[in-house]
Image (cartoon, grey):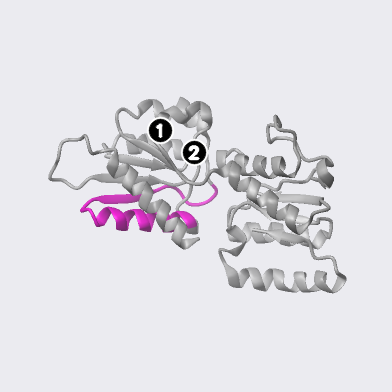
Amino acid sequence: MGRWLSFQIFLAVSLLCGLLFTYPTVAEPLQFALLAKRIDQRFFIQAGEGCAEAARAQGDVCRLLGTSGPPHFRKQNQLLEQAFHQKLDGIALSVTQSEWLAEHALKQRGHIPLITFNSDFNPAEQQLRRSHVGFDNLVFGKQLGRLAQRLRPQGGRLCVLTGSLRDTHQQERLHGIRLQLGAIPNHKGTERLRGENGWFEPSRCPLERAETADRALLQLATLLNTNQFDVIVNIGSWPIDQPAMYRQQLGPILTGLDRQGARPVIII
């Protein structure tokens, strides 16, 4: 994961720099910004460090921008407006709510080169960015679905833990899981599985806002304690961002379920 993240960061910075090849050569260092959904999450902290390191290697500057706590599109919109007024040479944006940003801050962008990373715009707004650095999230979701099929071929009761389903990449991963498990091809990814190939999603699922280690572990422990699920899929790495906490909180629960022969498949 670390090597892949480093590669993505390198690619993001390379794209930002590449967008400027047609600009006149200047003596001042180029100023880039990585605008994250939040700056207190491990993934974005590493992304910011990698961007800063890659920029320094070329004599330039890359700053991590964002707010702490749960992501909010209005806060990100405000920061994006401020960034556009700073005359930056390039911005990499992890998108919170695509349509809102397009209708507000992005109308003030001017000529600043913009790419997205981690979370892209919706298809209707993708013309607003030059490129995207990240996974093919629909394929990513289908791969999670294949793992579920391999580990539980008879199907079963499924619950997916996600971040915010307003985020494009979260929607696409969930859609990919459902398509792989049997949803009809024109399924929009918003309807729960209702028995396709033996797979069911209870009304309480998917569970949103699992985007921190604390919250993801709480939600995962809650699901395990109900003993009502056959497969639990977390579409991010949040539960294992704090490995010691994972072992401490879930170890006793999983041991008890093993004794009962009732341990579900957990895919992270």
Q: Is residue 141 rendered to the left or right of residue 32?
A: right
Instruction: Identify the secondary structure beneath mark 1.
Output: loop
Furthest-left residue in this view: 27
Query: Where is mark 2, residue-wise?
Result: 120
Q: Is residue 210 rendered to the left or right of residue 230?
A: left
**80, 185: nearer the viewer:** 185
Q: Is residue 46 magenta?
A: yes
Do the residues under discs 2 and 1 have CB atoms within 8 angstroms? yes
Q: Is residue 182 magenta?
A: no
Quadrant of the image containing the C terminus: bottom right
Who's the residue at 78% across and 46% down the image? 204
Query: Where is mark 1, residue-wise?
Result: 129
Measured as percent of width and height from the top left, residue 159 is found at: 75, 50
The 10 Å Cα crowd at callout 2, few under 14, some 14 to 19, many 20 or more, is many
Instruction: Identify the secondary structure beneath mark 2.
Output: loop
The earlier-in-sequence mark between 2 and 1 is 2
Instruction: Identify the magenta region.
Output: 43-70
Who's the residue at 81% across and 46% down the image? 199
Who's the residue at 42% across and 36% down the image? 78
